[in-house]
Image (cartoon, grey):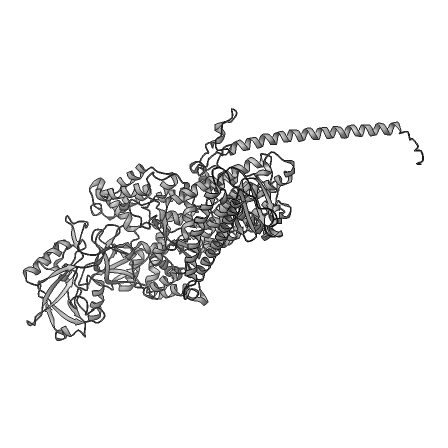
Amino acid sequence: MEPEKKVEVEDPEKKKKKEEKAREKELKKMKALEKAAKRQEQEQKSSNASKKSERKSVKRTDDENPEDYIDPETPSGQKKNMSLQMAKQYSPRAVEKSWYEWWEKTGFFVADANSSKPPFVIVLPPPNVTGALHIGHALTAAIEDTIIRWRRMSGYNALWVPGMDHAGIATQVVVEKKIMRERRLTRHDLGREKFISEVWEWKNKYGGTILQQLRRLGASLDWSRESFTMDERRSKAVTEAFVRLYKQGLIYRDLRLVNWDSVLLTAISDIEVDYIDIKERTLLKVPGCNELVEFGVLKKFAYPLEGNLGEIVVATTRIETMLGDTAIAIHPEDERYRQFHGKFAIHPFNGRKLPIICDAILVDPTFGTGAVKITPAHDPNDFEVGKRHNLEFINIFTDDGKINTNGGSEFVGMPRFKAREAVAEALQKKGLFRGSENNEMRLGVCSRSNDVVEPMIKPQWYVRCHDLANQALRAVTDEENKKMEIIPKQYTADWKRWLENIRDWCISRQLWWGHQIPAWYVTLEDDILKEFGAYGDHWVVARSEEEAQEETSRKYNGQKFHLSRDPDVLDTWFSSGLFPLTVLGWPDDTDDLKAFYPTSVLETGHDILFFWVARMVMLGMKLGGDVPFTKVYLHPMIRDAHGRKMSKSLGNVVDPIEVINGISLEGLHKRLEEGNLDQKELAVAREGQKKDFPNGIDECGADALRFALVSYTAQSDKINLDIQRVVGYRQWCNKLWNAVRFAMSKLGDEYTPPSNLTPSVLPFSCQWILSVLNKTISKAVKSLESYEFSHATTAMYSWWQYQLCDVFIEVIKPYFTGNDPKFTSERRFAQDTLWFCLDIGLRLLHPFMPFVTEELWQRLPSPREFKKAESIMICDYPTAVECWNNEVVENAMDLVESVVKSLRSLANERRDKRPAFVLCRTQVVGEIIRSHQLEIVTLANLSSLTVINENDAVPSGYAVSVVNENLSVYIELQGSISAEAELGKIKKKIEEFKKQKERLEKTINASGYREKVPTHIQQDNDAKLASLLQELLSLEEASGHIESQARQ
């Protein structure tokens, strides 16, 4: 029996206090519940609103203002005014507006010569002043801007120098056509001074269009340093370079063979010569000829031998040049002609004696008649023969392509192609013509005038290249003292081949527009010959006429003289070869030159590796004391989607501005009609456009075009550009847009991101996305450093598309559905992780797609701890965060994704939710799958997921797939799909896969396979075989499962 308890009386004051405390506690509890209810109500509203916004068909609510989705006007140069609400669809036209003007005006592109940051410098290959932006320029700009924006964000004092080339021939031709069209005048009618004035006027009015178009592409060039190859500073530098090289014995004047254009009346460089392959007799249109001209025909004729010894037959495709023949060459060991050694042939039109010479270098006794006519003044090979045998050099053409007095009175004044017919007829009359036959040949034509190039012997200025080339060669190939790297490496062989076989460089042109050569011809009072240039040693080279006067007075010691400046101008490649020096202020010792030379990388097309790159290196090393750049990156040449060269006559030319803005098929046709195609070419071009662009070109925007072009750089030496790929990247921009729209709806107006994340406390999906983001950052940076740009674009695209959008954003949606209290912490962690992903992902992508990344980044909320940068382009480029790496989580997600992929495949991408089972054959796999059921249900769109082991009964009425040896998945068969139909499909697939497996095994087991086949192909084949075996295992298990169910 328990003792009786004593009843205690509570103190009234204490009781009162207790009751008051209880009431206060209850009041606080009530207030807390009210707050929670309100918060839940608000979150429910927010959730409902976000659900509505995510639906494809959205009905506008009464209080929604359409103006909230439209960007207000932004005054030029000011930071863009963005709409209150993000537009529901990405529009490149709206997004790419206003940002560039603000970037430029704010000075984000300007480099500081006095900065303590390490320099990184690119000089833009100067486009022609006559040019409009073509797709090659767009590729150059896309690659270089990617590099320069990345380096700028990576802490470098990044300088990208813009400039334009005066384009001697191209510009002169444009202006000559203009004055002829408008005033029916030639440049000679105007005179040199007035014509040059007209060209400057045209340049100031129309030139530089391309630089404005580069702005449209987003090119972050330092416009404060814009240069023009003929501005005052560059002209002074060109003169200085010529004078220094001349005084060092590296520039000289000589009489040599050049490519002569009879329309432009100038020598042209090899790069300005296009070649037409002719298979047989072909009639072509030639400028200045009223009738078509015959090519591809080898004509034979006989030279009578002196002393009635008979005749010797020769053959040529240019029979008119026989008027300048000065010898006939035979092979010294050709028995047919041994009796003619030391004899002479007689020219049938002028009686000139032509020695029969023996030349084993030129003559192939098995080709043709074994005898070769020699015209030293009009053929490169014959020119060399003429020098070897001291032959006479007879020029038979005037500068405008007519026969001169050396050609004989019978033909003088005839245009060269009229003379071709006349000479053949005259030989026939003399009984010396021996017939003709088809002959395969390459015909050189000028790329500017379409004139057939005529080899002509002319006095010209040359750069002595042998020693300069050796220096440039060693800079690349000397492994112990390597100064420059060429990327891709395959072009190092071209570099070596060209520089080892280099010839002296002809740098004079018979034009008016360009840098006039700073050389004066001295006519002395006592000279017998008074013609300009009569004496090869009467030249002085100086920086000005005053200096030339002083130099001449010293040289000729008081003799009376008259100076005449050389009217020729320098080859455009000479001034552009000096560009990396001159844009930085050379020959003056400027701050820019000290800070930024040598530059970091030259990026250009591989087609001008010799014509421009090699010459820059030669001149830079000689005049600047070092290589002009330490790396050369050569991009591929762009072709159309079918691999054809882009040509106006094919209608396949792609104008980047039309890709950015979009254009209709009619607009494309109109552009063709504004060109200079004839009616036949126009019809072919129109058909080409209809085939390639039946609906015109969609508006893609600069970002999509840039990303597409950079991603194409993996295609070796050619890019087959398919516009649909650009359209695909424009649609991907919409994906980025929607990802940020989703984020903004889940972050809310009051959200403030943290300064950092602690991965260990984050949900599984958050840990995973940060780990794979880390890998993407590392891959992108490594790829950029090694100039493997397509690897970087692939890594970024894959992360954004397949990991962030397709997996992470989908998998976190349940955290935001219905404001479930059990997901409170996950919701906050998902918000923080999402913000970090978007901030880093946009910075990672910015160098490739500057406009959309700026716009989206500006909309992200800022962390409280530090002030947000003014622009994404001056933010830090992302670097990997060591503590984010998590291989265990990545492996688990790989397993989850494999399960999801198999379930989706079984469901045939149908969107109706179904129940599913996962059979796990090991405990470890079972634990992983059980831990991540929510992710699998969400991603595979299931109504339920049950995890079973090998001891559990396999469900009936389900389709099955083997994920791997440890996992199989089952999904309920629904609708009209019968077990029999499913079994039939599976059996058919099994047969297909067995055939593939047998073919692959036959290849792998073939004799010599392991020794002969490259390792990477063997690895690919091994992976394919493993995949086929896995598929067969899966299909056979599925077949067995359905058959066992049918037997029950």
Q: Nearer the viewer, residue 699 or 302?
A: 699
Query: Looking at the picture, does residue 937 appear above or below residue 428?
Result: above
Residue 103 in the image, given as x and y percentages of width and height = 47, 42
Residue 480, picture quadrant: bottom left
- Count of numbered circles in the view: 0
Q: Is residue 858 left or right of residue 365?
A: right
Q: Is residue 633 left or right of residue 256?
A: right
Residue 785 in the image, given as x and y percentages of width and height = 48, 55
Screen quadrant of the N terminus: top right
Identify the residue at the far top of this view.
62
- Residue placed at 39% from the left, 41% from the top? 660
Residue 476 in the image, given as x and y percentages of width and height = 41, 63
Q: Is residue 960 left or right of residue 298?
A: right
Q: Is residue 567 left or right of residue 894?
A: left
Q: Nearer the viewer, residue 209 or 359?
A: 359
Screen quadrant of the C terminus: top right
Identify the residue at the far front of this view.
1047
Q: Nearer the viewer, residue 978 or 329?
A: 978
Say whether residue 932 is visible: no
Say whether residue 984 is visible: yes
Residue 123 in the image, given as x and y percentages of width and height = 41, 52
Residue 202, picture quadrant: top left
